[in-house]
Image: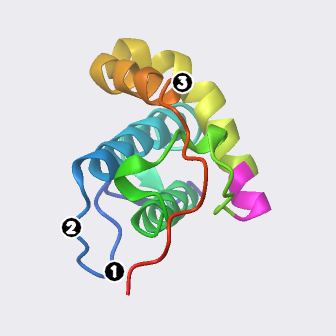
Amino acid sequence: MGKTTHTVEEPPGQSVVPGPRIAREQSTIRAMIGIFCRDHHAPDGDLCCDCQDLLAYAHRRLEICPFQEGKPACNLCEVHCYSANRRQRIKEVMRYAGPRMLLQHPVLALLHVVDKRRAKPKTMPTPKR
């Protein structure tokens, strides 16, 4: 029997309106997981359950990122907000999808490269009350 699939959509949860940087990060991770899933799990264009769960997790992590609009690229960040298992899975997705992003989503890919060149924050921001 084949894997169950879901349509690619925003993960359920609180209706948080992200800033433009976080929204772009969410679009980038959605595109990367979409490429990976299409080529490894669900060629029909929908995300399999595992990839849908990973996308929802990534979106939640971005929503609560302490750096928000000033965030560095995740691989350069001093705060590791992904669990070890999920961090390994997202690395696998990014290693595979990263080079393919240039052809399939060139604007997102180039903006991600620019983001990787941003200066990373020196300290953790203080939480808002």
Q: What is the C-alpha distance between the residues marked 1 and 2?
A: 12 Å
Examine the residues drawn in magenta and state their main secondary structure. helix
Q: What is the C-alpha distance between the residues marked 2 and 3?
A: 26 Å
Question: In this view, which residue lies farthest toward the bottom?
Answer: 129
Give the residue drawn at x 75%, y 48%.
88
Q: What amino acid does circle 1 point to?
A: Gly
Q: What amino acid does circle 2 point to?
A: Val
Residues drawn in magenta: 83-87
Q: What amino acid does circle 3 point to?
A: Gly
Q: Position of residue 110 (x, y in %)?
A: 37, 18
Q: Which mark is residue 98?
A: 3
In this figure, which residue is indicated by the disc labeled 2?
17
Q: Which of the marked residues, 2 or 3, is nearer the chain's N terminus? A: 2
SS state under label 3: helix
Q: Which mark is residue 13?
A: 1
Q: Kindly report which numbered mark, 1 or 2, lies closer to the viewer in this rendering.
A: 2
Which quadrant is the N terminus positioned in? bottom right
**Viewer-closest of 18 and 36:** 18
